């Protein structure tokens, strides 16, 4: 959440991918639950854990999961 708050303060447009959130907004940020749409709309994807579903956009992915173990 600290990263999100920091980016919001920098006036960076954010979107969140979360298939379990049924609302279209979380803390003032647009929520998408369609992964393909999310990947298309995103210039950069920040994630805690890498996932094979992001392999086709790995050039957009920034993660702390450098060993793919997290």
Image (spheres, helix red, strand yellow):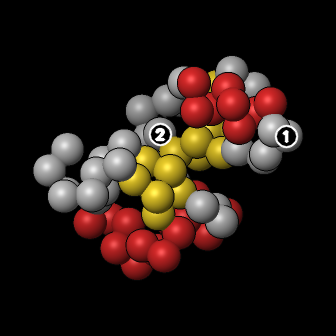
Q: Is residue 64 left or right of residue 3?
A: left
Residue under the image location 66 percent in, 45 percent down: 15
Looking at the rendered image, the quarter that the C terminus falls into is top left
Q: Residues within 10 Å of mark 1 (few under 14, many from 20)?
A: few
Q: Residue furthest right?
A: 11
Q: Is residue 19 left or right of residue 44?
A: left
Query: What is the distance, in whole Å, between disc 1 and disc 2 at their CAs?
Result: 21 Å
Q: Secondary structure at mark 1?
A: loop
**Residue 39, how many percent across, how many down?**
55, 65
Q: Earlier in the sequence, mark 1 or mark 2?
A: 1
Q: Is residue 53 left or right of residue 12?
A: left
Q: Residues within 10 Å of mark 2 (few under 14, many from 20)?
A: some
**Residue matched to label 2:** 18
| Residue nearest the viewer, comparing 25 with 12 | 12
Above or below residue 42? Residue 28 is above
- The mark tally for this picture is 2
Residue 62 in view here: yes
**Residue 49, how many percent across, how many down?**
30, 48
Q: Which mark is residue 34?
A: none
Residue under the image location 78 percent in, 47 percent down: 13
Looking at the rendered image, the quarter that the N terminus falls into is top right
**Residue 5, how many percent across, how many down?**
67, 26
**Residue matched to label 1:** 11
Residue under the image location 38 percent in, 66 percent down: 54
Residue under the image location 57 percent in, 24 percent down: 2
Above or below residue 33? Residue 29 is above
**Residue 52, how many percent across, how many down?**
26, 66
Q: Is residue 21 left or right of residue 68?
A: right
Q: Secondary structure at mark 2?
A: loop
Among the 4 quarters of the image, the one containing residue 31: top right
| Residue nearest the viewer, comparing 49 with 27 | 49
Residue 29 in view here: no
């Amino acid at each position: 959440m600290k990263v999100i708050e920091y980016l919001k303060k920098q006036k960076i447009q954010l979107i969140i991918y979360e298939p379990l959130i049924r609302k279209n907004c979380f803390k003032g940020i647009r929520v998408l639950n369609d992964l393909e749409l999310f990947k298309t709309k995103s210039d950069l994807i920040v994630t805690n854990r890498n996932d094979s579903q992001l392999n086709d956009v790995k050039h957009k992915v920034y993660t702390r999961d450098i060993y793919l173990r997290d």
